[in-house]
Amino acid sequence: MGRRMRIRPAVIGVVACVAVLTPSTAAAQAACDSGGNDRLRIQLQPGAIDYGVVSSADLDAGQVLVGSMSVRVQPRNGRVRDWVLCLRADRALFGPGQKSVDDVEWQVAGSPAWQPASTAGQPVLQGSGNERVVVLFRVAVGWEDAPGDYSAPLTFIASVQ
């Protein structure tokens, strides 16, 4: 039996993509912890990333690179609002082998740093008005991982600042 990896993000609020990533601030972190609100709408394209069956070469390399996901944040009623987009893992462990969710990493396209997923909300992007950002995902894999289907549910949260 092979190892199958999938990331399925969910949405709270509105999604938009922006190419500018601002540093995390205390206000941004507070917004991540707030749980979102209905003044923003988020759209994801695609809605899930399916890695398919992990190959021997992937296991030897220690990671699987995924495709990208476009996230669009859009204020409702066309109002220009400052917002923060956050990402949170729904649970700390996933899959039959109970992999740690920090084996899933994300990166804003164009940013040099990969960030491990966490059950604590993490600021991804701060913006204003309609914006779109591309987020990349990868998963650390190894021969010690139990064969089976793995799914790591992640949630994007958009909050008005």
Image: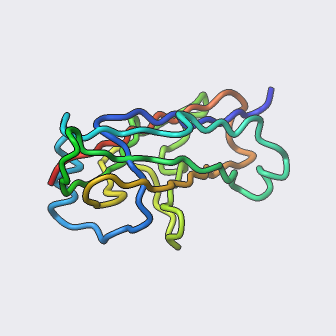
Number of marks present in the image shown: 0
As rendered, which of 3 and 40 lies closer to the eye?
40
Q: Position of residue 41 (x, y in %)?
A: 30, 38
Q: Position of residue 104 (x, y in %)?
A: 53, 49
Q: Is residue 139 left or right of residue 143?
A: left
Q: Is residue 146 left or right of residue 138?
A: right
As rendered, which of 134 and 104 lies closer to the eye?
134
Q: Residue at x 39, y 68 (%)?
A: 20
Q: Quadrant of residue 36?
A: top left
Residue reaching furthest right?
Answer: 56
Q: Quadrant of residue 27?
A: bottom left
| 84 relative to 10, above or below | below
Q: Position of residue 130 (x, y in %)?
A: 32, 52
Q: Is residue 114 left or right of residue 56?
A: left
Q: Residue at x 17, y 43 (%)?
A: 34
The quadrant of the rendering that contains the C terminus is: bottom left
Q: Residue at x 41, y 33 (%)?
A: 10
Q: Position of residue 21 (x, y in %)?
A: 37, 67
As rendered, which of 123 and 59 lies closer to the eye?
123
Q: Residue at x 78, y 51 (%)?
A: 58
Residue reaching furthest front?
Answer: 78
The colour scheme applied to this rendered structure is rainbow
| 17 relative to 53, above or below | below
The quadrant of the rendering that contains the N terminus is: top right
Q: Quadrant of residue 76?
A: top left
| 37 relative to 27, above or below | above
